[in-house]
Image (tube, rainbow, N blue to C red):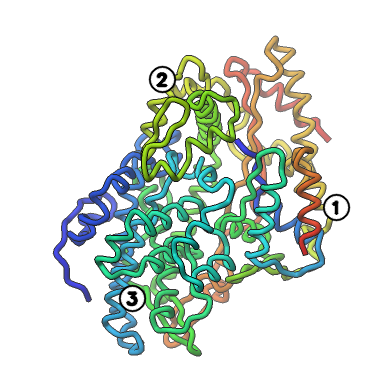
Amino acid sequence: MCYIIDSESVLLNYFSKNESSEISFRDLRSLRKKIEENSKDPVYVDIRYNSLRDAISLHRDVFSMELTRISIKKTDAEELKVDFVDKIINSKLPDKIKAMYMDLISSTH
Amino acid sequence: MLHRKSKVFLDTVHGYISVPDIYCDYFIDTLLFQRLRRIEQTSMRSLYPSARHDRFIHSLGTFHLGSKIFQAIYQNSSSELPEFSDALWDKMQETFEIACLLHDCGHAPFSHTFEKYFDRPACLSDKLIQASKNKQFKYDIESQADAAEHEKVSAYLVFTYFLEKLKLLKVDPILVVRMIIGCLYEVEKTPKEKLANCFISLLKGKIIDVDRLDYVTRDKWACGFSSNNVSIERLLSAACIKKKDDKYYNCFYKNALSEIQNVIDVINFQHIWIFSHHKVVYDQYILEKAIEKLSTQLSGTSDKEKSLNKLFNIESFFGTTKIGTHSIYLPTDDDLVHYQKIYLDNNSYAKEWLSRNHKLKPIWKTFAEFNTFFSHLSPSMLEEGGNLEKQSTKIIQIFLSSHNENKENYLRLGVKPKFKVIGANEVFIAINDNIVDYDTLKLPQKTNNLTRFFFYIFIPSHLIQFSNELIDSLKEIK
């Protein structure tokens, strides 16, 4: 099965590595496309509505979801620190995917 | 309200379900819809042998609840909303009922497990946009959150397979599709769009929708597990639409408050105690591996991705597709079970899945045990990919070697239990003339301080008597 990058990883990486306080679903879709197209190994970026909702539910003090975008409510949250994300969220990323994913998600905004 | 000649289905969960004759002729009595009889509803059967319910009866149940909630809303709200004509209510009822009926018709075999392959590379949204030929739909679908793959396939089938029938009924296919994938009108200009947005959220909503209400009650009935009972009658009869500052809200009267909490409790029960159960987690893993292997056996190549893409391909809804020398048409669980049996000799995962003779057993069975054993570790060590998980590899291998077992003969499967809490702007309650956000009611909700991640370790069953030895070694990790 292909490697799955889950919604929590996408949101925490995006907001910890960009200065933006929101991301539109339009941008999330193009980010998904870029990551999946650029990966040499099969990868699936899970940005489905229900998965995003579950991720936001897990970090409800940090994120809020509107009709067309996801915003951050608390910019100084521990979960949005690069160290936290790299140590906790990215530690399981396969090396073959990691560099490409980090590169694309950091340069989205 | 519409008066139509109907057929009656007897359902063990909801009782008699009355379906207009025309829906039977146009939608239900078709190869595509009947296929759903052979798509299992959940992965719960690995734990509950009686859970044999399928997407067919769930679709009828969702239709039934959709019909009931529509009638309740019409009775509770139509007189307060004169801007919506009776003709609009009638057409909305037909549209909503058809969307409820067809919402799952695009499910893949084994439901959610493999559906991602329908949209790899991502193309389904583009297909829907092309089929709709509608600029507003294009704008809305591109700017809102992505639907699940099976929802997009169902929507595509509405635009193709069922299009002519919808035209005969003068039902707007784009609105049916919007309801299935949860695509709201961002700008509500007409009364139709305003009323439609309410019903889009009642099929694919944030917390309470008729799809969820059916599977919550049906899963509970089919499995037989003990959890809260949801009084569907009480909940649906309390549904209404309220208007405030030119905005429309789906609300429930205050007498349904306890039922709303019951729904959440059952959903959370399922996630914590069933979908996170070691048997379900293991069985799901074995099934994925068995089908992955099967796909390469059928295609005759070793490229798993390409093989899975061929096996789970939306073209198979429209005609026979080829995978290797084999043919697939309207694939169901049964087809894949049949092929697994044909190739059983060279597929150990399929053997294990079909016989349910699990070769490996878990050394702990709940996250409660996991938390107890490792309560001394910091949260970061317990995370996915944290030190506990990393260091456990070597310890497991030493344990296996010391018992003369292949050091790779184990499995470590991670679980992220889900837990739903009703947040702001998700559910609204009508209290007298006020529309109140459920979140502001300060009702007691269960803790959100739930385990984020834990893992099971499965070892050969003959070594399970020594599992304490392994657990003690793992507890030494710092």
Position of residue B300 in the picture relative to residue B253 (left or right): right
Element at label 2: helix
As drawn, the residue found furthest toward the top would be B404
How busy is the neighbourhood of tag 3: few (under 14 within 10 Å), some, or many (20 plus)? Answer: many
User: In the image, residue B142 lies at what x, y percent?
Assistant: 57, 65
- Residue type, mark 3 in image: Ile
In space, the residues marked 2 and 3 are separated at their CA atoms by 52 Å
Q: Is residue B264 above or below residue B413?
A: below
Q: Visible in this render: residue B430? A: yes
Residue under numbered circle 1:
A83
Q: Is residue B103 above or below residue B443?
A: above
- Residue type, mark 2 in image: Ile
Position of residue B208 in the picture relative to residue B232 (left or right): right
How busy is the neighbourhood of tag 2: few (under 14 within 10 Å), some, or many (20 plus)? Answer: few
- Name the front one of labels 2 and 3: 2
Q: Which mark is residue B342?
A: 2
Position of residue A63 in the picture relative to residue B47 (left or right): right
User: In front: A80, or A43?
Assistant: A43
User: In the image, residue B86 lies at what x, y percent?
Assistant: 27, 82
Q: Quadrant of the N terminus of chain B?
A: bottom left
As drawn, the residue found furthest toward the left would be B5
- Residue type, mark 1 in image: Asp
Q: Is residue B358 above or below residue B70?
A: above
Position of residue B207 in the picture relative to residue B419 (left or right): left
Residue under numbered circle 3:
B73
How busy is the neighbourhood of tag 1: few (under 14 within 10 Å), some, or many (20 plus)? Answer: few
User: In front: A24, or B319?
Assistant: B319
Chain identifier of the residue bearing label 3 in the image: B
Chain identifier of the residue bearing label 2 in the image: B
